[in-house]
Image: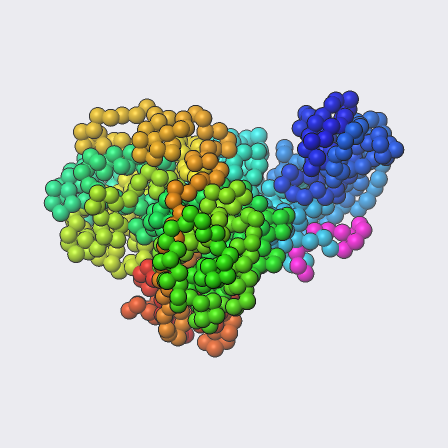
Amino acid sequence: MVNLTIDGKQVTVSKAATIYEAAKEAGIHIPVLCYAKKLLPYGACRVCLVEVEQMKGRLIPSCTTPVSEGMVVITTSDEIKKVRKTVMEFLLVNHVLDCPVCDKGGECDLQDLAYEFESISNRFEGEKFDLPTDEVNPLIERNMNRCVLCGKCVRVCDEIVGYGSYSFINRGFETKIATAYDRGLDCEFCGQCLSMCPVGALLPRPFKFKARPWQLKEVDSVCGYCGNGCTVTLGVKDNKVETIRFNDKIGVNDGNLCVRGRFGYSYVNHEDRLTKPLVRKNGELVETDWDEALQVVADGLSKAQQGQGAGILSGARLTNEELYLLKQVAKEVGTENLDHSGGECYKGVTEGLVETIGVAASTAAFPQIEKANVILAIRSDFYETHPVVGMVVNQAIRRNGAKLAIVADKKGKLDKLPGAKTLLSRPGLELDVLNAMARLLLDEGLAQTEGIEGLEELKTALADFEPAQVAERTGVDLETLQATARQLAGAENSAILMAYGLPYQGLNKELATAAANLALLVGIPGREGSGLYLCGEKSNSQGAIDLGILPQNGGKGAQQMLDAAAEGKLDGLYVVAEDPLSSYPDRDKIAKAFDKVPFLVVQDLFLSPTAEQADVVLPAASFAEKDGTFTNAERRIQRVRPGIPSPGEARTDGDIFSALAAKFGCSVTFTGPEAIFAELGKIATAYAEFSFNEIGPQGVVWGGEILQPVCKKVVAVTGGSSVKGDFQLVTGSALYHSGTVSTKAKGPMAVLPEPYLEVSREDAKALSVVDGDLVKVAGNGTELKLKVKVGNRLPKGVVFAPYHFAEANVNRLYKGEPVIAVTVSK
């Protein structure tokens, strides 16, 4: 700690603090323009100049100057005020004064500083900027006439996002922020630059001219997309979410958001939202009232359960409280057939991790990643599924010098980060690479084996995974494989990352088990600064696991329910917050199941392809209309708050479950989410230590920041699964979408509006196709037509199709395998 004096006030702060940070901690105001707490010090604007007695009274930037013992600082004097006002005059010489029509009005830092410095005139004259406005980007408008050259957009895109869209070009009075070759902005559309811009140079196009900031009601909640659990602040006007506001004061994401979190909110306002219950009469779905709809559901499920049984398929975007109530509904129906998210994709957590370390969750909180010296990511898609965690990885590399290796069947955003090494494997053989790394650790005596069970069995199972043989079999570079394993073993802190979700069912348990084996052999579980992370695709994937939305006591899982329904051996299905026809593997089987099941209920936001097949459709609420909690991939329980009312007669899933349970004669009622949360500890004991009202802005983490393993046992897993064919198809997530709900959001659809088949340039040349050409993709007895997207990240012979678009029917090809043999032709 360091002691210093600021404006006569004694201050004690960390020796790593700057003068500005010390003053802020002491409650002393210093104006800034280019400073942001999550960016490295820069000192571009000179607005924060202060005087330091030991530096002979000269003025220095407080945001870049570190504190020192005994330092005496003056933040306000006549000379300082004069200099700051002069800086403001320089900034305003060329700055266009279009404040009345600038969307930044009311929250513009330049406006605030001009007011603070009483800048009512200017001694300097100059020609106002007259640069063209860049509107190429569908989500971000760039008006460089308003730019003050603070550099925050350049720095956040580089330091946090790792994309590098912006840079300074030219010199002197001609200096400006521009993209490569001064073209229109074409990036990954995360909008991080929007949150950093202190003026109106960068603005969100979907929000343009919608409202002034003081007209918005701000509601802090949690993003409804992936399992990262980012805090989002809803900007609400007239009971409509108009924007997502920047907020770096609370939450786990430090204000960072991806394209989905920042621009994917509009589906909650979509005109196609269901507003009334629907019941099928004479072959048609017709509107009805809630009482009739719920009675039909109760009668239908009761009849099904008395026959060949009923089952419940849930999504993982319900709140924890709603999941609890769903279990109550299952109890009232009398069924143990309960599952979520397709029933296979989460088994890496519920089986792989449980068998190896005894816990069904990631072992550390996300901030531990920033401390890592070595990071291993399994699948390049990890950035696409969890972009904000990917930004944490970027910060670990740039600020902590972390080394990153990716085991994947294709390249992605992670490969572009500084120093990243890709172990590019043939599709379906990533498991072999992980096994080879474990074999090397054991052969070279680098493994930490004390207290670990199953070592002899593992050594025997790894006989066929000698690194050189695996390198030849998988196509991975041998030296990179060896170096990665040795780096993991030698690292003081390390992290292993893997995402799971509906398009990643193939070998999911096996990959997670192999990742856990590696983690145990290098001592990750339970170690400060290290972590094994398995991150779910949906916003409450971890909560669904914690609360046991799983088949128990001999109940059927999702796939078993669908198989039984397709064979005419299940009489009722209740599908909640899921669209299996669009997103589950093996669409043909699912279509057959829904066609044959006598009674089908769907509860969702939209009349999805699955809902169109239902006998009863119940209109549900979005995350922006709910009160409760989500649990993210690092086990952090956070508050979800309602910002808007549900459209029409739509109800929250929790309200629907309560009303449905009452139809079955259940007399247990709850006064709200607080009362339900108090019951969660009876199912998930780790939740019992918390109360609903204790969950503050940062949430609470069950098990602590570092979760200790219950056991340490390596488990042998066999090798991967490759296929032979003209082409190998892999599916997964695209950066701009999450599940299928994002296809109802204007932001993601403005960037990626349609399905595609991604091919390498080499394959595109061989097929004589270019971007936008239609090709036939045939495999698994199915032929599809998709538009071509030519890229640089795929090896020759590998093609990729995202699974988000229902109309593409990709899940007719994909039946849950890690890779599919296909033919591709014009």
Place of residue 397 in the rendered image (x, y in percent of width and height, measured from the top left): 60, 51
Quarter of the view holding residue 290: top left
Residue 105 in sight from this viewpoint: yes
Q: Which residue is drawn at 48% across and 77% down?
A: 766
Q: What residue sits 74% from the left and 37% below the top?
A: 66
Residue 251, image x, y percentages: 52, 36
Q: Is residue 402 above or below residue 707?
A: below
Q: Going by the image, does 2 lie left or right of 636? A: right
On the rendered structure, is 684 left or right of 144? left
What residue is drawn where x is 48% and y is 48%?
524
Which quarter of the figure has residue 300? top left
Q: How was this image coloured? A: rainbow
- Looking at the image, is 470 positioned above or below residue 614? below
Quadrant occupied by the N terminus:
top right
Q: Nearer the viewer, residue 425 or 313?
A: 425
Query: Is 425 part of what is drawn in magenta?
Result: no
Q: In the picture, residue 727 is in which quadrant?
A: bottom left
Residue that protrudes farthest toward the left in the picture = 307
> Left or right: 704 with respect to 2?
left
Q: What stretch is highlighted in magenta?
A: 170-181
Q: Where is residue 454 in the image (x, y as percent from the top left)?
A: 37, 53
The answer to whether residue 512 is seen in the rendering is no
The quarter in which the C terminus is drawn is bottom left
Residue 174 within the magenta-colored segment of the rendering: yes
- In depth, the one of 438 and 442 nearer the eye is 442
| Identity of the residue drawn at 30% across and 68% down | 780
Where is residue 82 drawn, in percent x and y? 83, 31
